[in-house]
Image: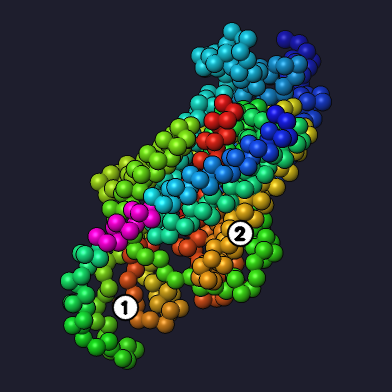
Amino acid sequence: MNIGEAAITAVFGYAVVFAGLLILMIVLYCMGAFFKEKSFEKTEPTVLIEETKPEPIQNTEKKVAPGSAGRIKLYDVPDKEAAMIMAIVADTMKKPINELHFISIKEVK
Amino acid sequence: MDIVETLKTLASNSGFAGFLTIDGLKNLIMIIISFFLLYLGIKRKFEPLLLVGIAFGCLLVNVSNFFSGGESSADALYHPELWDAFLDHNSEFYHSYGHIMAEGGLLDILYIGVKSGLYPSLIFLGVGAMTDFGPLLANPKSLLLGAAAQLGVFFAFFGAVCLGFTGEEAASIGIIGGADGPTAIFLTTRLAPHLLGPIAIAAYSYMALIPMIQPFFMKLLTTEKERKVVMTQNRKVSKTEKIIFPIVVAVFVILLLPSTAPLIGCLMLGNLWKECGVTERLSDTVQNALMNIVTVFLGISVGATTVGSRFINWQTVGIIVLGLTAFCFSTIGGLLVGKIMYKLSGGKINPLIGSAGVSAVPMAARVSQIEGQKANPKNFLLMHAMGPNVAGVIGSAIAAGFLLAVFK
């Protein structure tokens, strides 16, 4: 292979990678738009429920936490470590832990 | 029994006597290199799961095989001449795995999994099961950063041709810039199997060195203001989207480039097992047990290809230099497109996430996070950087598929 051919192959190859991922991006946007619409339809009634929620607690330091914000999935993380991580995040964000919704904690190996 | 004669025979048969030849000296150098790689893997924790295996494979093959005159030692664990015959169209043993099984050593037999492309594909199965594509689905623009970060692949490919490597060899060297070990091994075994040792070692070493290579370019190509950008939280991705994603990608990418089928197919199957929610046992097995088993075989058999007499030459030096160039240019490509996105989004996208477009999951994303936090301690870029990071895996597989389609 000569240098000219190599240059053309390199430019064309880079263009193919871009084109492939660009088309995939468009597909994902369409997919995302479809699901966003669907989830919006589903979540509409819950908006009303949220509106009737009581006033947020002002002094969270003195009062007892009013419950958790859902369940958390732990992957290869002991309960103690998960509790510690959640406490650190809550402290860093200056938010009461029961107002944060942790979805999952996974150890990155 | 003639004791003196017996001692002489033992001495001449011992590996120590092998060091006295020119090729034996190369083995000695490789043994020292294997000690250094073991140090990097164990003490410095550079990709230890693979590097320790590769280093020990390198050690084993160089203490057991004093290759001279085209023949391996009697007790060699790996026989390069068997694989030469396997690849030689004129040989009676062309593509004869039976010959390898009958005549080969332990590492020859393990190497069959590398040669056939089995191990890289199985590794991708595990990678797929461990990867959360949620950040990519939440922000599909990340795919462009994954594409941009393949710049190094094609730059190094061009550089390698300029340095006199053949097209097949150049393609195998270029893919180091994809920062994806299994893809590099997969492509090299198909296009330039004789370069597998140096390419695999370069790929894994540079992947481990990402925290040292990337920050320099990140600081060089971005301003303090750009690095401080705090990105807004991504939207929540539904379970259904996560289930459909691997099916869509598998169909789309394999139709686009059929040669990517082993890698993309396994990556997406692993991910589907993870996300579908009804195959937890399989997902758990490929993430842990299978991944560990394949890592054992892959590491040691790749290390086995580093026989001193074949490894120590100027080609290896060229590959090491071009591999580093590929990594640097991939980082630069990702950052430059990141900067373009920063401008086009009106300063909402932090360009540091661009460098995560080189695969190396999740290390490259961690580097973006660390550098982002150095500029602004309140910056949490990790999840934003995971999008380009996993896009890079798909991007490097597409780049490999393109090179395979051109040269195979």
With B339 as the anchor, is B246 left or right in this view? left
Q: Which of B177 and B34 is in front in this view?
A: B177
Residue shown at 65% from the left, 27% from the top: B194
Question: The disc labelled 1 sits on which kind of residue?
Answer: Glu
Badge 2 element? helix
Chain letter of disc 1 in the image: A
Badge 1 element? helix
In x, y percent, where is residue B12? 77, 19
Pick the quarter of the image with the N terminus of chain B: top right
Pick the quarter of the image with the C terminus of chain B: top right
Residue shown at 28% from the left, 53% from the top: B240
Disc 2 from disc 1: Cα separation? 36 Å
Chain letter of disc 2 in the image: B
Residue B176 visible in the snapshot = no
In x, y percent, where is residue B356? 55, 56
Task: State the residue position of label 2.
Answer: B335
In x, y percent, where is residue B379? 52, 72
Magenta residues, start to end: A28-38
- Circle 1 residues within 10 Å: few <14, some 14–19, many ≥20: some
Mark 1 and mark 2 in contact (Cβ < 8 Å)?
no
In x, y percent, where is residue B2? 76, 11
Q: Which mark is residue A99?
A: 1
Principal SS element in the magenta part?
A: helix
Q: How is the image coloured?
A: rainbow
Q: Nearer the viewer, residue B163 or A24?
A: A24
- Circle 2 residues within 10 Å: few <14, some 14–19, many ≥20: many
Q: Is residue A65 above or below residue B250?
A: below
Both labels 2 and 1 in a single chain: no
The answer to which image quadrant residue B28 occupies is: top right
With A84 as the anchor, is B278 left or right in this view? left
Q: Which of B349 and B308 is in front in this view?
A: B349
Question: The disc labelled 2 sits on which kind of residue?
Answer: Leu
